[in-house]
Each structure stands twice: as structure tokens, then as C-alpha cells.
Amino acid sequence: MSESKTLIEELIELLESIEGDFSQVQKLADYGNNVDRIMGGAKSLALMAPPEHALHMISDYAALCKAVGYKASQITENEQFYDISVALLLDATETLEILLNNIHENSATLKENIPQAFIERLRWVSNQFSESFAASVGTGTAPKKMAQSEIDDLLKKLGL
């Protein structure tokens, strides 16, 4: 839990340091890597938790953040969309911090911390990415593409 809180601080610092600087677009892959660590930890712990436990929601929410971060790291020639994506990720990361701080609550209660306006922005941003954008980055194998339907499925799974 303390590692996740430290990672959240690092994620926010990273996003704030690249905000408005399109030359730093590749750093969004670092964002994706770090939020992936939170997702992995939550998923591992969720294996031992009941279905309504917050860990399930936190891992799915972190998966959305990861997908947007990786996809946004591949933006070329669209500085405005980069700025929108960074702003969205800042909001998303702050919400992830709220979710982690309230991990003792059940998923239904945690959902109240995710503003509907944010969900609409997330859907809009994720719809702007073509299917050619990968949802993960170089591991030596072909990058995994996250289809829009997979993002929609995660949102549904979160009940959003």
C-alpha cells in the first residue's frame, strides 16, 4: 500500500513535469509502466479478496489509466490531444489516489468517488485513439492492442 502511494506521487510529479511539453510525449510510457505496477499489485491481492472488495475496482481502474498512458505515449503531431490526455491522466491519477486511500470501502462506495464527467472525458479520449495505438509498450514481442471494446468492457466492469 505504501509503495502504491509513493508511485502515485511519482505519477503526479511525472505528469506535472511534462504537462504542456509535447516533446516529452514518450514519458507517458513511463507513466503506463508505473501505473501497471499498481494494477499488478492490486490484481495479485484481489485474488484472495471477495468479489465486492475495492482491490478489484482499483486494478480495473489502474488498467484504464495504463491503457490511456500507453496509447497517449504514441501521439504524433497532435499537441492539443497530448495536452488533453495529460490533463485526463492527472485527474485519473488523483482519483486513483482517492480509491487507494479508501481501499477499506466496498466497490459500490468507491464508485461514488469517480465523477461522471470524468467517465465521459475518458470515453471521449479513448475513442480518439485509433486501433493502431498499442495499449502496452516494447517488450520485444508485438505490442498488445487494446480495442475500444476492451476499454468499454473495463468501464462496464467498474459499473461506470
Image (cartoon, rainbow, N blue to C red):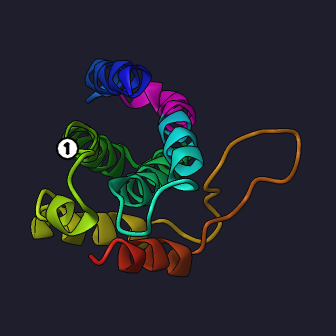
Q: Reply above or below: 128 against 23.
A: below
Q: Please identify the quarter of the rendering in which residue 61 is found.
A: bottom left
Relative image position of residue 158 (x, y in whole percent): 35, 71
Tell me the kind of residue under disc 1: Asn
Percent coordinates x, y for residue 15 in the rendering: 32, 28
Q: Residues within 10 Å of mark 1 (few under 14, many from 20)?
A: some
Q: Is residue 7 magenta?
A: no
What residue is drawn where x is 38% and y is 80%? Answer: 156
Residue at image coords 59%, 74%: 147
For the point 68% across and 64% down, which residue is it?
Answer: 145
**In this view, 70 is above or below 148:** above
| Left or right of 51 on screen, residue 110 | left
What x and y, as percent, mark residue 54? 33, 56
Task: Report the residue at 37% width, 60% height from top.
Answer: 57
Give the labeled residue for mark 1: 102
**Residue 21 vs residue 102, the one in the foreground:** 102
The range drawn in magenta is 21-34
47 horizontally vs 57: left or right? right
- At numbered mark 1, what does the secondary structure look like: helix, strand or loop? loop
Magenta stretch, main secondary structure, is: helix
Front residue (pair 125, 113): 113
User: Between 130 and 136, which is closer to the camera in this rendering?
Assistant: 136
